[in-house]
Image (cartoon, grey):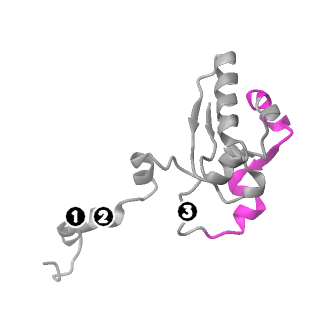
Amino acid sequence: MKIYLPLDSAAVALGADEIAEALHTHARAKGIDLTLVRNGSRGMVWLEPLVEVETLAGRMAFGPMTLADVPALFGDLAQHPKALGLTDELPWMKAQTRLTFARVGVIDPLSLAEYRAQGGLTGLDRGIHPHQRCWLSSSNNCA
């Protein structure tokens, strides 16, 4: 089971660290292999702590979470009292065009592999290996 829970200051102030500990405790008690990713906030502070559970359909959002809401995450997610639906389908998220913060809340901010998988470091790679672009280009303007 993979769960995302923000680690930014707003989420922590609203109890995210306690939720994280409760998630680990309940997962251990049920013998569930839990991967908890402490990501950045999606910006919906009124829903913090916002928990996202990875499902086959996408990441399902739950919030604002309390310690009392944690055990139900290990049951039927559709029946969870704080179930909001797929995160990317929430009206507030759908109304946005996320440019600068496109990866915030989506990946582990400490994972270089996840950052690369989302297109991060592309500019740096181009700067380090400028001649590779020349091989792919029909332009004679390569130095």
**Residue at x 69%, y 48% (from the top left corner):** 13
Residue 36 as seen in the image, left or right of residue 10: left
Q: Which residue is mark 1?
A: 128
Type of amino acid at the residue the image marks with label 1: Ile
Visible residue check, residue 53: no
**CB within 8 Å, label 1 to label 2:** yes
Quadrant of the snapshot with the N terminus:
top right
Query: Marks 1/3: CA distance?
Result: 24 Å
Query: Marks 3/2: CA distance?
Result: 18 Å
Circle 3 packing at 10 Å, graded few (<14), some (14-19), many (20+), is few
Q: Residue 105 appears at what percent x and percent y?
A: 59, 53
Query: Marks 1/2: CA distance?
Result: 6 Å
Residue 114 as seen in the image, left or right of residue 71: left
**Residue at x 44%, y 53% (from the top left corner):** 115
Is residue 32 highlighted in magenta?
no
Q: Residue 92 appears at what percent x and percent y?
A: 75, 63
Type of amino acid at the residue the image marks with label 3: Ala
Circle 2 packing at 10 Å, graded few (<14), some (14-19), many (20+), is few
Q: Residue 55 appears at what percent x and percent y?
A: 66, 39
Up the image or down, 107 lies above or below 101; here it is: above
Secondary-structure class at tag 1: helix
Circle 1 packing at 10 Å, graded few (<14), some (14-19), many (20+), is few
Name the residue furthest bottom. Answer: 141
Q: Which residue is mark 2?
A: 124
Q: Which stretch did the figure color magenta?
A: 71-97
- Return the mark for residue 102: 3
Name the residue furthest front. Answer: 13
